[in-house]
Amino acid sequence: MASDGKAEDSVKIQILKDALYDEMRQHGSESRAFSQKDILDLNIIPNGNLELLLQVVQRLCDDKLLVGIANHHAGMAWRWRSKEEAKKYTTLPNDETVMVYSIIDEAGADGIWNRTIKNKLNMHEAVVKNCIKFLESKGYIASMKNVEHPNKKMYIKATLRPSERATGGPWFTEGELDTAFITELEGIVFEYIKTKSAYRGSQPHPGGAAGAGTTKVPKRGAVTAGETTARGTKRSATEISNDDTTTSSPSAAQTKGTSGGGTATSKSRTVFLPMPAGYKHYPTVAEIAKFIHDTGITNNTTLGEADIQQLVDVLTYDGLVEMVRVGRRRGYRVARAVKQDTVPFHKRQKEREAGNGLDLPLVQGAEPLSNGLTEAPCGRCPVFQLCEEGGPVSPSNCVYFLQWLELEDLPKAVAPNVAVQP
Amino acid sequence: MLVTKPIAELCALLIDELHGELPSRIFAMLLSKGRSTVPQLSQYTSMTPRQVRHGLAVLQQHNLLFYHVDPGAELAFYEANPDHAYNLVRTGKILEMIDTTFGAPAKDVMQSLLLSGQTRISDLVAAYQEKIEQANKSAPGVGDDGDFGAEPNGADGDSQSTKSGGPLVKSTAHLNTILCRLVEAELIDVVHAKSFESSEDILKTVEKEVMAKYFPGGVKGNKAKAEFQERIAEGLRKVRGESKSLKRKLEQNGTAAKRRRLLSGISAVNGVHDEDMDPALDPRQVIRINYEKCLVDLRNRRLVQYASDMIGETTAYVYGVLLKLLTKDLPRCRSDPVMDAEGDNEESEKGPGSVTTEQILDNLKTSVDLSLGIGKAERRHISSTAAEKIESFPPKKKRFIEETEVDGEASADEDEGDDESSEESDYDSDYKAPATNGTNGVNGTNGTRVKFEEAAAPKERRMDRPSMLRQHLLILAESTQRFVRHCGSNEWTVDFIPVMDSLREAELDSVIERTCGRQGLRLVRILRAKGKLDEKALPNVALMRKPELQQKMLEMQTAGFVSVQEVPRDLKADVKKSFFLWFCDVDRSYNRLLDTSYRTMVHCVQVLEALRQKERDVLETTKRTDVRGREKDTMRKSYYERYSRFLDCERKLFAQVMRVDDLVSVLRDF
Ligand code: SF4
C-alpha cells in the first residue's frame, strides 16, 4: 500500500513536474525569476499544496531544469533552464565541473575571471584548470577579453555573446579601441554636419592682402598696428573708406572696401556661409544616425543614437561643431563655417595621394586660430623655462629667433616653430 | 596689477626703448624697492641726486610715476606706475585706432601727445604753430618732423612718406577741433592734482576726509559701515570725475547737434568743417592720453576681429558699428569694484544700455553690401520665433562657461513656456502660409519684419537693407559666443563679461590646440565641461586609447593646462588603487599664459637689443646728421642692405610684441 502510494506519488510528481516546467516556459523567458507565489498562481500544484510544490521544484532542480536563485527582497525564486542546457549539466562528469560550469553560466554575458571562479568555489587551482579545460574542449565555454581588464583571463558560456560592457561597445575591435574606424567615422559625420549646416555660396574674392591677414596665419607683422608697419598697408584702406569704422585690422578694412565698394577686379570664390538665425534644419543626432545607417558604412557593427551622440560630442569637444537649439530642436552645426574647406575631406585625401597639396595640413575642419604667443618662437620653445639673459640659453644667442627673422637658415628639424606654421 | 619679475623687466625695457636708459634704471629701481625718496634713489642707483631728478622728471612727464607728499613732510615719495609703463606697448595700436577712427591729423596730434607726455594745451598749440609756419614757408614736401616719429632709433625713416602733402594739421583752429573731438571721445583727459597719486593714496586721502567730515566719532554698526563705503565711493568718483572736467565744459558749450556730428565723426576727416564752432580750449589745461578709454576702443576692435574669425567679415563689420555706438559713453572696460559698487544694483542691470536697429542702420557705410556673408534658406526652414527670441536680462553669472549651457537650455525652455501657444501656432504657420506670420506678437511691432515678409513672397528674393542688417544681428545673437543679446524688440546690447570670457577661452584654446594638438584640446574641453574626471573615465569620453591619452595628459600637465589630484581609496593610500582625478583650472592656465606672454615680449625686445649690438657700426652711421634721412643715397650698398634688414627685423619684433600684447589685453585688461 505504502509502496503503491509512493509509486503513485512519483508518477504524479512526474506529471506535475512536466506540466509546471511547460507552464513556466509559457510565462516568461529564461531570465525571469519566479517566486513561490508566482509558481503557485500557475495553478499546476493542486490546492496550493506547499509540500507538493517543494517536492516538484526539488525534482526539477535536480534535473537542472530549474535554477534556484536567492533574492534578497523576495526570498527564494527560480528560473527555468532549457532542456539542452540542462542536458549539458547532466552530462558533466563530476561535481566540480558542474560547479565551475554553473558559476560561468551565472556570470552571463559579462564573463568571469578564472581567479574569481577559484576564489568563489574555494577550489584548488589545478582542479579549476582541469574543469575549464574540459568545458572548453566540449565547446561549452569560451575564453573572452574584457576591455576594462585586458590582462585578466575571462570565461563566458560559448552560446553567449560578450556584453557591451565587456567588449567596450561598438568602438572596440577585439578589445582594442579601433581608432582608425573612429577617425573615419568622425570624418564622415563632420562632413555631413558641415554640408548640412552651412550654406555653400560664393563671395567676392578679397584682395590678396586681406586673404593673408585672415586665412593664412599672419606669420609676423602682417596683422599689427606697428607704427611703421601699419603705414604701408593701411593707407590704402583709409583711402577707400575714409569715414570712420571700427574695423578690426587694416586687412579687414580693406576687404570691406573692396567687397563693399565693388572695386572691380574681385573674383568670387566658393565658401561656406552661416545659415540665417532660426534655421530649423541643423542636423540632429537622430538624423546623423540615420544617415550613417543608410550609408551602410558600419555594416557589421550597429551604432545606436547614443553611440553617434558620443561621436558628435567628441567633435564638439574638438571645437569642430557646436550645438544649437532652435526652438526645441537640438541640432549641430559646423563651427566657423566661413573658414571651412569647401572641398570634401576625402577628396583632399585623394589629392594628397596623388601628390598635390602636400603642404596643406590634413586635418578636419578649419585651421585653429592663432595668437601672438603661438606665432612667436618662444611660445613653443623647448627651453623656454631656462631662457634668460645671462643664462646658458638667452634671447641674445637664440637660434630660433634668428631663423624666425630669416637671418639664418637652420635645418628645419631644429626649429621649434615649424610645427606652428602650416 | 601684480608686478611680477617679467613685467618689471618688460617695463624697464620699454622705458629704455622710448625714453632712454637713465629713466629706465630709476624705474626699475622703484619697482624693486617700492616707494622711495630722491636721496634713497640716488643711493640705490649710485647716481647723483641731479641725475635722479632728471630721470624722475622724464618719468613724471610721461605719467610713469606716482608721488605722494605727506602733509608736513619734506621729501616726496616716488612710486612706479607699472600700468602706464605697460601701456607704452600699446602706443602703436592706439595710434592706428585713432587713425582709422578720427583720421590722420588726429593721429598726428595723438602722436605728439604720446611723445611729449602730458602737455599744456598752449605748449601743444605753440609747437604746432611753429610746425605749420615752417611748412608754409618752405613750400610743400619738406615737412620733416623727425621729432614726432614714434621710434627714436631711426625706424621713422619712412615716416616721411605720409607727410608728403604738407602738414596734416592745417591751422591751430584745426588743432583745436581735433582736440575737442578727442576730449569728447574721452580719449584725452585732463591732468589734475590727484593724477599723480596712486590709487591707494587717493583711497587713503578720501577715507580720511570722509572720516573727518561725516564720522568724527568712528564708524559703528553695519549701517554706518555701508554708508561709509558709499561716501568713499562717492569721493573716489569725484576724484575720477575731475579728469573729465574739460569734456563736461565742452558738453555745456556745444550744441547737441554739433556734438552728434562730432561723435559720429562723419565730416572732420576731410577737413571741411566749421572750426569756429568749437569752443577754444583753456590753454592752461594740461592734457594727456586716457588709456582707459583707449582700451575700450581697442577691445571693440578685438571683438570685431573675434566675430570675423567666428562668423564672417560682413557680420563682424555690423558688430563693429554696434559696439561703437554702444560703448560711446562707456568710460572703461572693467568697472572698479569700489567706485562702481554702489551703482552695481541699478547700473549693471542696465549694462551698457542698448542700441536700436535704426541707429545701426544710420551708421553703416553705404558701400557695404549686407547681402554678403549669410547663407540663404527657404522661408519655411526658418523659425522666426526662435531667431527673434528676446532676452531681456543678461545671462546669470554661473552660466557663462560653455558647459553650463546645459542648464541654460533648461531655463530657455522655461522662457519659451510663456508663449508656448503662440509659438506652437507659429511653427504651424511656418509650414502653411508665411503671410500669417506677420501677426505674430513678437514681430508685429516692428515694421522691418513685415517688409521682409513681402519681400520673401516672390520667388527670387531681394531683401531690403534693414532686413539684411537684422539677419546679421540675429546671427550674432544666436551665436554660441553670444556676441549680442537681443534685449528688446528692436534693441541690441552686448554682455561684455560673458563675451570676453568666451574670447579668453578661445585664446587659451588656440594656444592649447597649437601646442598640444586637437586631441589635447579635446581633453581639456572635456574636463572643462565635466569638472573633475577619473583617469579611467576619460578614454571613454574622448574615444582615445589609454596610453596615448595618458601621454597627452602628462604633456599638458607640464604645460600647465591640466592638473591631477590623487584620491586614495582607503587609509593605506595604496598608489595602485588610488583614483586619479584630472581637472583643469582655467584661471591658473590664464595666469600661466600671461606670464609666458610677458616673458615672450621681454625676449623679443632682448633679441632686438642683441641685433642692435651686432649691427652697431651700421646704426652708428645712420645717426650721422649727413646720413640721416638719406640713408639710401649716402650709405654703401652692403651697409644699406644690412640697415634695411635690421629695420625689417625691428619691425617684425615690435609687431610681435604687439601681437602678444593683444593676448595680454584679452586676458588681463578687457
Ligand atoms: S631660446 Fe629663443 S625661442 Fe626659446 S625662449 Fe629663449 S628667446 Fe624664446
Image (tube, rainbow, N blue to C red):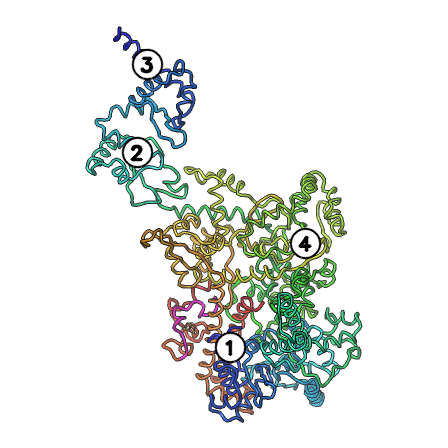
Q: Are marks 4 and 2 in contact (CB under 8 Å)?
A: no
Ligand 1 closer than 8 Å to label 1 CB: no
- Real-space Cα distance between discs 2 and 3? 31 Å
Q: What residue type is labelled 3?
A: Ile
Q: Which amino acid does label 1 sit on?
A: Asp
Q: Which portion, as a residue range, is magenta? A: A373-389
- Residue A13 tag number: 3
Ligand 1 closer than 8 Å to label 4 CB: no
Q: Which chain carries label 3?
A: A
- Real-space Cα distance between discs 4 and 2? 62 Å
Mark 2 vs mark 1: in front = 2
- Residue A104 tag number: 2
- Real-space Cα distance between discs 4 and 3? 78 Å
Q: Are marks 2 and 1 in contact (CB under 8 Å)?
A: no
Residue B156 location (% of width, % of height): 57, 82
Q: Can residue B135 be seen in this view?
A: no
Q: Residues within 10 Å of mark 3 (few under 14, many from 20)?
A: many
Q: Which chain carries label 2?
A: A
Depth check, front residue: B400 or A209: B400
